[in-house]
Amino acid sequence: MQKLPPIEVYTLIRQILTEKEFSDISKRWDIAKMLHSGVTQRQVASDLHVSLCKITRGSRELKRPNSVIKKAVTMHFELQKGQERIQ
């Protein structure tokens, strides 16, 4: 199977998910990024207006061995640092 370019993956996801589903997934991604950055669960809940239950789930996933979400968040921040160095 060939790889899809990132823009096509994004388009595919937007076509498959409803606006609410996309928003929920985006919020979960924001939770993971904030937790990975050291923001407390209570602060995440306050900033994003989400329940502690949702945040706890994200926190648990980040602590799992071989966590794919942790790998993705780490890659996200590494790419972000690389882009900042270029500018």
Image (tube, helix red, strand yellow):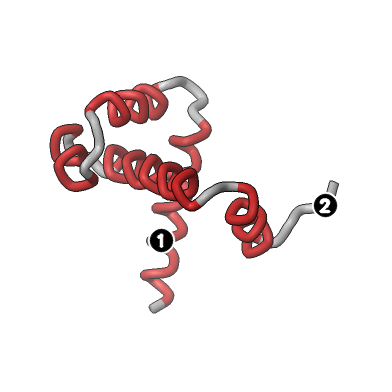
SS state under label 2: loop
Which quadrant would residue 51 be assigned to in this image? top left
Q: How many marks?
A: 2
Of all residues, the one furthest to the right in this rendering is 1
**Residue at image coords 37%, 70%:** 84
Amino acid under disc 2: Gln
- Which residue is label 1 attached to? 80
Which residue occupies 70% across, 61% down? 5
Q: Are marks 2 and 1 in contact (CB under 8 Å)?
A: no
Q: CA distance from mark 2 to mark 1?
A: 26 Å
User: How crowded is the residue under tag 2: few (<14 C-alpha within 10 Å), some, or many (20+)?
Assistant: few
Residue shown at 36%/45% (left/top)?
A: 27
Q: What's the amino acid at mark 1?
A: Gln
Residue at label 2? 2
Q: Is 5 left, or right, of 41 in this rendering?
A: right
Q: Earlier in the sequence, mark 2 or mark 1?
A: 2
Around disc 1, counting alpha carbons within 10 Å, would you say few (fewer than 14), some (14 to 19), or many (20 or more)?
few
- The picture quadrant where one finds residue 61 is top left
Residue closer to the observer: 48 or 63: 48
